[in-house]
Image: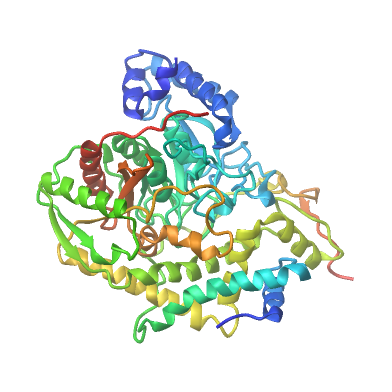
């Protein structure tokens, strides 16, 4: 399988990465090189094989459903590019 | 005081206990070495004030008889680890102003045990690379050079800064992260010891996530014993990471020097690649001889799905990366580039903030997870991963205790020499290391010799899950037989 220019534009948008028109051809070449490389997997017999979900067999740890943290709003917005009164500021999304 | 930087971590620990010198003197000597070695670009942030404060606090604890197991030991920390109040960037433009308000579990355990932070080391952006050339801060220059040549070489990657800092004696040890070989490949390229523990051995909490089912933290050091000492502090249960196992941490140092007599060592035939340099084959043969002389039994084994590990990795790792890196959106932290609406802001922020390799991997990951392609790529790769793991399990169930392989398919290459036209050329560097991540196993790279150009070559040992101790025992045998390899300072 390989991707065409339109697919590259669609992937870029899905990935929320702006790509200039003059980068499309180059990116297409690189993505297709990667896809050609992984193509060899299609020759592996995988019928009846379970996909890996956990590399180390273990039951996921669970903890009591209780508040263990909090009261650190100032810390949480500390690295925000824009914030006001401990809220993150974003461009208007609702008219 | 330059001799203080040539001590091993073990020697420094023992001398500090005897009060031969102070922790403040030890850290000052390393800070001076770092300052003189800026041409290596190994550090993206030096923290001299913090180092001196921490070292003085160590001296006070030593005086009070309350020294921890790493008391006063100066370390370098890969910039993938979040360090409270100290800029942590993953060597990406998108995080280049990020100052965490929290400390990663692994580093907090190092500080708990008395270690001193010298600074943050350079790496490939988000640990995506094998040469340190994708770093926003520029590549690290290896302390090693080919005999009679000034060509700048890569220290390997992604943990290139940590490996270079340890090899150049700028610190007594360092942390790295390993997703496909990012500790073991740079260790092999710089003549240092690098251990990737079993998946789940070290907490991933507070480490910038790349591919969550593959990422593990591990130590770099100049000696096997030093790496064992570091891992004991780094490993252990953590309630904040549900994939981190609740399993007591053994005394890894006690495994160093232990007899390997009677251990059965698998030699996987699939690791003998066509076109592999004769020197790699030679060093592998030497390694087999050393282990045999120490009483280990060598057995040829087969890991039939080996060749599929790298392509499967280049589906699984980008898929997980595309998901993990979705958080960099210009809203909560990191870079923001304004746009005409919120989507435009996301797209411009991520376009400016991510370098070429990261963009490429996020896009491939997005594609293989997208509707209509998930089964053909991602699901198939996860099935292949099950088969890769089963190959190892079959050998271990048949009585093999560990495996011996080359660490890399070549010695270090020159900066700018690889991956310019085709990204896959660079990816092939991890062909011997990536299987270990895919199967979640522990692996260690240990220096084994020099090639004809005077560059270090390493051997890799692969162990059973949570049997890092056997790897330390075997690596110590190789270290003992191979000797020590240090670069000639040119910086």
Classify A74 as above or below B353.
Answer: above
Q: Nearer the viewer, residue A53 or B94?
A: B94
- The answer to whether residue B212 is visible is no
Q: Is B193 left or right of B159, judged from the image as shown? A: left
Figure quadrant of residue B259: top left
Point out the residue furthest to the front here.
B148
Q: Is B325 left or right of B226, judged from the image as shown? A: right
Residue at the image point whose x is 15% and y is 66% from the top: B398
Residue B56 at x, y = what percent?
50, 18
Q: Is B25 left or right of A48, judged from the image as shown? A: right
Point out the residue furthest to the right here.
A95
Residue B237 at x, y = what percent?
39, 49
Quarter placement of the N terminus of chain A: bottom right
Classify B331 as above or below B105.
Answer: below
Residue at the image point whose x is 33% and y is 36% from the top: B229
Classify B236 as above or below B264.
Answer: above
Figure quadrant of residue B390: bottom left
Residue B425 at x, y = what percent?
49, 62
């Amino acid at each position: 399988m390989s991707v065409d220019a339109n697919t590259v534009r669609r992937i870029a948008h899905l990935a929320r990465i702006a790509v200039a028109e003059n980068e499309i051809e180059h990116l297409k070449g690189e993505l297709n090189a990667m896809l050609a490389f992984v193509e060899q997997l299609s020759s592996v017999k995988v019928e009846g094989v379970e996909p890996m979900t956990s590399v180390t067999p273990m039951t996921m740890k669970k903890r009591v459903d209780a508040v263990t943290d909090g009261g650190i709003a100032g810390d949480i917005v500390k690295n925000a590019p824009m914030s006001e009164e401990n809220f993150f500021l974003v461009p208007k999304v609702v008219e | 005081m330059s001799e203080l930087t040539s001590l091993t971590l073990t020697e420094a620990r023992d001398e500090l206990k005897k009060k031969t010198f102070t922790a403040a003197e030890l850290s000052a000597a390393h800070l001076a070495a770092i300052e003189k070695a800026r041409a290596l670009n190994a550090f993206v942030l030096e923290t001299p004030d913090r180092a001196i404060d921490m070292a003085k606090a160590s001296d006070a604890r030593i005086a009070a008889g309350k020294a921890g197991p790493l008391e006063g030991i100066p370390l370098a920390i890969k910039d993938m680890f979040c360090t409270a109040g100290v800029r942590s960037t993953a060597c990406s433009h998108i995080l280049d102003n990020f100052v965490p308000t929290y400390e990663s579990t692994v580093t907090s355990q190092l500080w708990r045990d008395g270690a001193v932070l010298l600074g943050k080391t350079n790496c490939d952006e988000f640990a995506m690379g094998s040469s340190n050339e994708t770093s926003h801060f520029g590549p690290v220059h290896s302390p090693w050079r080919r005999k009679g040549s000034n060509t700048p070489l890569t220290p390997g990657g992604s943990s290139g800064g940590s490996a270079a800092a340890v090899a150049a004696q700028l610190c007594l040890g360092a942390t790295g992260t390993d997703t496909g070989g990012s500790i073991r490949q740079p260790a092999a390229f710089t003549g240092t010891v690098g251990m990737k523990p079993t998946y789940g051995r070290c907490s991933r909490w507070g480490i910038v996530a790349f591919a969550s089912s593959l990422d593990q933290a591990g130590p770099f050091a100049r000696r096997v014993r030093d790496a064992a000492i570091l891992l004991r502090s780094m490993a252990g249960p953590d309630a904040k990471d549900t994939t981190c196992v609740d399993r007591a941490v053994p005394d890894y140092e006690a495994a160093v020097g232990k007899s390997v007599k009677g251990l059965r060592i698998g030699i996987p035939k699939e690791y003998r690649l066509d076109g592999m340099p004769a020197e790699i084959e030679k060093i592998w043969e030497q390694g087999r001889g050393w282990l045999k002389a120490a009483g280990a039994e060598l057995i040829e084994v087969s890991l039939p799905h080996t060749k599929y590990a790298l392509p499967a990795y280049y589906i699984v790792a980008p898929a997980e990366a595309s998901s993990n890196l979705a958080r960099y959106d210009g809203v909560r932290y990191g870079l923001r580039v304004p746009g005409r609406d919120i989507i435009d802001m996301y797209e411009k922020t991520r376009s400016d903030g991510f370098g070429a390799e990261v963009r490429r991997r996020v896009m491939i990951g997005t594609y293989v997870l997208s509707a209509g392609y998930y089964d053909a790529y991602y699901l198939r790769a996860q099935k292949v991963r099950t088969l890769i793991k089963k190959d190892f399990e079959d050998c271990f169930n048949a009585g093999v205790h560990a495996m011996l392989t080359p660490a890399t398919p070549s010695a270090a290459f020159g900066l700018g020499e690889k991956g310019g036209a085709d990204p896959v050329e660079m990816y092939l560097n991890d062909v011997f290391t990536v299987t270990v991540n895919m199967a979640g196993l522990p692996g260690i790279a240990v220096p084994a010799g020099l090639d004809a150009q005077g560059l270090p070559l390493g051997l890799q040992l692969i162990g059973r899950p949570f049997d890092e101790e056997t790897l330390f025992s075997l690596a110590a045998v190789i270290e003992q037989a191979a000797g020590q390899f240090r670069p000639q300072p040119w910086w």
